[in-house]
Image: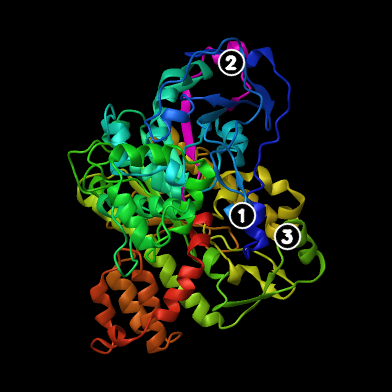
Amino acid sequence: MNKTNSIFILIILLIAGCSSELPEESQRTINQGEVIGIESDNNTFAWLGIPFAEPPVGNLRWKAPLQPKPFNSRFEANQFADICFQPGGLFGGGEDWTGSEDCLYLNVWTPAWSTEELKEKKVPVMVWIHGGGNTTGSADTYNPSNIVFDNEVIVVTVQYRMSNLGWFRHPSLRQGDATLEDASGSFGTLDNIMALRWVKDNISVFGGDVNNVTIYGESAGGHNVAALYASPLAEGLFHKAIVQSGIVSHSDLVEAESYYPESGISGIQSSKEVLNWLLLNDDKATTLLEARDVQDLMSLQESEDYLRSKTPEELLTAYRNVRPKKGGMTRAFNDGYVLGEKGILESFTNQKMLRVPIILGTNRYESKLFNMRNPRFVRWGEGEGIVATAASWAGIEELPLEIMNPDFYNAVNQYAADSWKERAADTPASQLVASGHTNTYVYRFDWDDLPVINGMDFGVLAGAAHALELLFLFPAAFDNVLIKNLVVKDSYEGAIKLSDQMMSYWAEFAYTGDPGTGRSKDLPQWNPWSDQDKYMILDSEEGQGLTMVNNAVTVNSMVDEMAEDQRLTSDEKCQTLFTMAYGGDFPQAKFDAFNKGYCLTLDYSDILEIMEQRGDDDDQDS
């Protein structure tokens, strides 16, 4: 079991509490036939496990999704479908596997309207795309009943293929009757597009407005939203977008289909290295060099047949074991069809592309979720009392006991989070506005009113870490006994208030494309990104509250601030710059910012070793 803070274990306890009742008022007729739902939380109806595509199994593995077949009888949508195939255990940290290749299903939540009320309804639709590094996660984790009932919107949660079942390019898979969609390799992206097509074709019978659809997602889900924002195939299928802590870069086609160089550095798991591992595992080669020779002698048809013969367990095991040194999140490819040749970034500057209102945002200390598990920063061991009991119940063997150097810890995390914000929010927002797209909004989530437990200040250890804002947008878990008493504790009322405010802003954006003063019409004005205002801070009243600020993060601003930062030594500044640049878009030239090239002379092998040891974990939690 990976070392994982109990706070973020509890965040995933958002699973909907639904009854098994099948009220006749929830019967709808969609393109596939009749479907009946259930009574869910907060006076809502839910339809669970509706197929939006044919199962991508057998010959349909690594193919674009196909329209689902009609139902043979009335479909009882009263339970979640299998999640997409992925590593088992908490955050995918186990050695076992879970889920199924047959996983292209979605869930729909609406207010529990009567039959008469439904006739008059035409409300905004919000389509949620889950995160998890595009390797783990599922739609059934999220219970959107609060925002649905409080703000009268419809929420659809979707699933998509992941890992090398969802994003995988190998020359052998582009043969014969393969379409441009099949050849793209971005099957997970195509799954999300198919889900949006299903929404367009069917959501009106649930009371949804097909001309007012908002896509939103967090982390890898945020990346997938950004990929849809940039995809010409998704044009017209949605009308607003919210990217929460998203990654806005793409995977390179050449790296995806090339053997790793001698350095072992690559931005993505190579399909050829996956095939090499499979050959070694099947004793068809005894060394990596021999596996390359065997693969090079295989025909395209032999390679395809061999890959298709493998079980999902074998494929994902290979995918996990061939992680390159410059590991990164599984991302969409710049194939020139599903995504343009210039990738997602082009959508922020190209005035000819169809662009819709967008919210971009990050959390104040994104990287603390990952760095608090780094033994370089935090000492872990056996805990005591109720916390240790709760951790044991969750399968956690160790707890955080001490932050070795709090100043250094906070400084490193500040610059890492600022770097994330620069790449995922501030620079894209600046580019969008500069290219004439003024309907651009940015936030930073700052809530950190976490308790002190057993002497550990979780506000310092974790604070507004990656994924914490999910609890506020899906607050069904707030009343979970463990979350109420161990996570929010004395800050419960303030957390609930901030949650209501955030959902109000999100819903108003879904209605109008402008978060404004929220759906409640009584919140501070959230202005678009401009020379006068940049972004909204989302915090409790015990902190900064809801506040517009006018400062932006740039590469130069980070380097300038770091140069004067007394919390870091010269070596530590260089190390921090290195970790920001490693695997990202931080300019290499900035290493020369200190002491006329001093940073370039240092040995970073120890940092690389630490980063590689925890690289798999980073993807699992994203």
Report which quarter residue 109 is drawn in. top right
Which percent across, then down, holds residue 323? 43, 60
Mark 2 / mark 1, whichever is N-terminal? 2
Q: In the image shown, does 399 or 620 lie closer to the viewer?
A: 620
Determine if the magenta segment contains residue 116.
yes
What residue is shown with label 2? Answer: 35
Determine if the magenta segment contains residue 483.
no
Taking 442 as reference, is 231 left or right?
A: left
What segment carries the magenta color?
109-134
Callout 3 secondary element: helix
Q: Amino acid at mark 1?
A: Glu
Q: Image height check: is 482 above or below 110?
A: below
Badge 3 vs badge 1, beta-carbon distance below 8 Å: no
What residue is shown with label 3? Answer: 486
Q: Image height check: is 500 above or below 153?
A: below
Q: Describe the colour scheme in one phrase.
A: rainbow
Which percent across, then down, holds residue 106? 53, 30
CA separation in Å, label 2 and label 3: 40 Å
